[in-house]
Amino acid sequence: MALEKVPNRAMKTYERELHGTYRHRAAGDTLGLWSRYPLREVEKLDLGGAWPHAVRAVARTPVGDTAVYAVRLPSVRVTFDQGFAVAQRDASAARLRERIARDPTRRLLLLGDLNGALRDRGLAPLTTVLRPADGRAGHGLGFTWPAAFPVVRLDHVLVRGFASTGTDVLPDLGSDHRPVLTGLRADR
């Protein structure tokens, strides 16, 4: 499980509440990654910008080692003089793609707020090396943002070595994004 934009004051609460089910944890800044399986090779990834935007760990799962990335790409901003300012987000996506392309694990999960729809050309570097696990969108269109009245899907699960058994966007839980729940099975 990955959580993005967790305030520092709330991280201990999440750790305490999730520990019974997800005993293994990796965190970096406002990103948290929780797992039922042991995590190793935990590292913060600097994708450019004002803060590290990703945490990577390798989970020892029943189907073998799986690299898991919890990611929050920089936000897209609308400015008067530049219009849609996507350069920082796009550069971070390209850096993340380079890292993923070099990742030696056969199975890989990218969980996160990519701050764009997957048809956005700025995210194309990621979709050339990973598949969306969206499968079925559950009920509705699968939009995640803004939580009160979602009109776009910014939050995604991308995979290598897995197939989706279903995806649902969960109800508004108090964030500005709605959470995504995806079932996965390992490719043979």
Image (cartoon, helix red, strand yellow):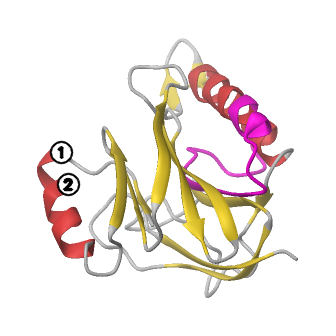
Q: Residue 161 bears which disc, if any?
A: none
Q: Residue furthest top?
A: 81
Q: Position of residue 77 (x, y in %)?
A: 49, 29
Identify the element where label 1 is drawn.
helix
Identify the element where label 2 is drawn.
helix
**To which quarter of the image does residue 101 belong?**
top right
Q: Position of residue 131 (x, y in %)?
A: 80, 59
Q: Is 93 or 61 nearer to us in this picture?
A: 61
For the residues labelled 1 and 2, say whether their Cβ atoms are less than 8 Å apart.
yes
Label 1 and label 2: CA atoms lie apart by 5 Å
Q: Residue at x 51, y 64 (%)?
A: 144
Looking at the rendered structure, the kind of residue marked 2 is: Met
Q: Residue at x 31, y 73 (%)?
A: 173
What residue is shown with label 1?
Answer: 8
What residue is shown with label 2?
Answer: 11
Quadrant of the image containing the N terminus = bottom left
Magenta stretch: includes residue 105: yes
Q: Is residue 177 left or right of residue 88?
A: left
Magenta stretch: includes residue 180: no
Q: Would residue 34 be visible to someone looking at this image?
A: yes
Q: Residue at x 55, y 61 (%)?
A: 59
Vertical placement of residue 31 versus 172, above or below? above
**To which quarter of the image does residue 139 belong?**
bottom right
Q: Is residue 6 left or right of residue 12?
A: right
Q: Is 111 or 186 nearer to us in this picture?
A: 186
Q: Would residue 121 be visible to someone looking at this image?
A: no
Q: Which residues are magenta?
A: 98-120
Q: Position of residue 65 (x, y in %)?
A: 65, 61
Q: Is 49 or 57 nearer to us in this picture?
A: 57
Q: Residue at x 63, y 77 (%)?
A: 62
Looking at the rendered structure, the kind of residue marked 1 is: Asn
